[in-house]
Amino acid sequence: MSLISLILTLIVIGVLLWLVNTYIPMDGKIKKILNVVVVICVILWLLYAFGIVNHADDIRVPQVR
């Protein structure tokens, strides 16, 4: 992923979050939860994009038969 597409994606996410916060009437607590969830998701996405956090390919889940 190029740096330009990364920056454009962050701008789009920021504008969408601003639009939701501005034009959709919600309780303050719900807005705060929504903002925290979006920020955590974006931080995780950035960590995966830069390769700081690897995907969970090494985690083995036992099969139930």
Image (cartoon, rainbow, N blue to C red):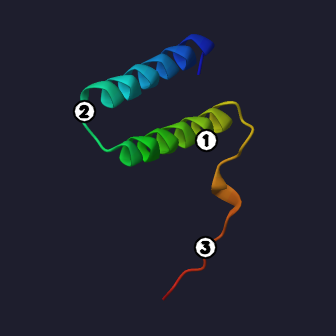
Residue 60 relative to residue 15: left or right? right
Label tally: 3
Q: Position of residue 34 (x, y in %)?
A: 42, 43
Disc sitting over residue 54 in the figure: none
> Which amino acid is tagged 1?
Leu
Q: Is residue 58 above or below residue 4?
A: below
Circle 3 packing at 10 Å, graded few (<14), some (14-19), many (20+), is few
Mark 1 or mark 2: whose residue is earlier in sequence = 2
> Which amino acid is tagged 3?
Val
Disc sitting over residue 24 in the figure: 2
Is mark 1 in CB contact (under 8 Å) with mark 2? no
Q: Position of residue 3 (x, y in %)?
A: 62, 14
Who's the residue at 56% across and 42% down the image?
40
Circle 2 packing at 10 Å, graded few (<14), some (14-19), many (20+), is few
Q: Is residue 7 above or below residue 13?
A: above
Can you name the residue that lies furthest to the right here?
A: 52
Badge 1 marks a residue whose secondary structure is helix
Q: Which residue is denoted by mark 3 in the rendering?
A: 61
What's the CA distance linking mark 1 and mark 3?
22 Å
